[in-house]
Image (cartoon, rainbow, N blue to C red):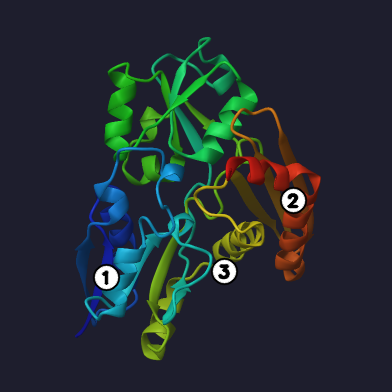
Amino acid sequence: MKSIRIAGRASKLALIQTDIVRRLLEGLSSDIDCSVVRITTKGDRDKSDFLYQAESRGLFTSEVENALLDGRADIAVHSLKDLPTLPRDGLIIAAVPKRESAADALVAKDKVTSIEQLPAGSKVGTSSLRRIAQVKLKRSDIECVPLRGNVETRIRKVAEGQVDAIVIACAGLNRLGLADKISAVLPPEEFIPAPAQGALAVQIRSDDKELAEFVRQIDDENSRIAVETERCVLEAIHGGCSVPLGVYSQIDGDAITIDAILCDLDGENYVKRSVTSSIAEAQKNARELAQELLDNGGRQILDHIRI
């Protein structure tokens, strides 16, 4: 029996995500036995501030990647949206399993079905620039406050009245069995999610050809195409967690539609574009769309945020 060590973050949600990959791999062969290597990352240890005020590149991923590079693990599982677009030397993404929902969700104290229905002056918890920008775009009166911690902690802060609502990924709630806490699913074409939100990355060492061939069997082609297209826009923007960029790709047959938005933190200036093309030209069109965002006000938005 072949043993495979899978590295992942030690949080409850990350362990569920790691277990999803473990079950997929063990389902391929009765001769596979997977064990989990739990890694506590810098992003898990430091919950004190907005993500964009921290040195956020690789905040949730670099220490998991280290376990691959130093031989403690054979595979690493990440939320793909957390991975920098520039891969680390010696590592590759061998598979992107079928994507969960890419949408964001509103979890609110009151019975509401949209951001527009929140009471005047509501406090909304989020540490994401992208979410802050799009919330303010819809409701300039809303106060966005820093919110870190695991999913259950964030939901508890709503129940205790520390915030009136939170914006959080549907995927995490679904994977944790907390979909009943969702007040509203925010349509991803309107409230545009982070590039690759809802997708998992199965990462291995680039020289492990045998494992690459095995892991590739759990790759979902449409999910991979969609998230690679979204990350292509992110790469062309030269962004990361500190950029208020939303990108969402939908595949319909041989066509792919890319929706993207760049918005300032006050919700006063934004640029939003959409393009539909053949899948074969997806990345070309993604780079062109990114340039269009930059040329039509996006560059000024980014310059202002980075001052």
Residue 186 in sight here: no
Tell me the SS state at disc 3. helix
- The quadrant in which residue 94 appears is bottom left
- The foreground one among 11 and 20 is 11
Could you tell me how far apart the alpha carbons at marks 3 and 1 are, in whole angstroms?
A: 22 Å
Quickly name the residue at label 3: 221
* N-term-proximal mark, 3 vs 1: 1
**In the rendered view, does 272 fall on the left or right side of 183?**
right
Circles 3 and 1: CB atoms closer than 8 Å: no
142 in relation to 288, above or below: above
Point out residue 282 in the picture as x, y percentages from the top left corner. 72, 64
Q: Could you tell me which quadrant the N terminus lies in?
A: bottom left
Instruction: Single out the residue that lies furthest toward the top.
Output: 120
User: Which is in the foreground here, disc 3 or disc 1?
Assistant: 1
Instruction: Name the residue at 48% across, 70% down.
Output: 219
Label 1 belongs to which residue?
6
Dot 2 amino acid type: Leu
Q: Is residue 120 above or below residue 22?
A: above
Mark 3 Cα shell of 10 Å, populated few (<14), some (14-19), many (≥20): few
Camera-side residue of 276 and 80: 80
Q: Quadrant of the C terminus?
A: top right
Q: According to the image, label 2 marks what residue? A: 294
Left or right: 124 in relation to 115: left
**Residue 229, horizontal then vertical, whole percent:** 64, 62
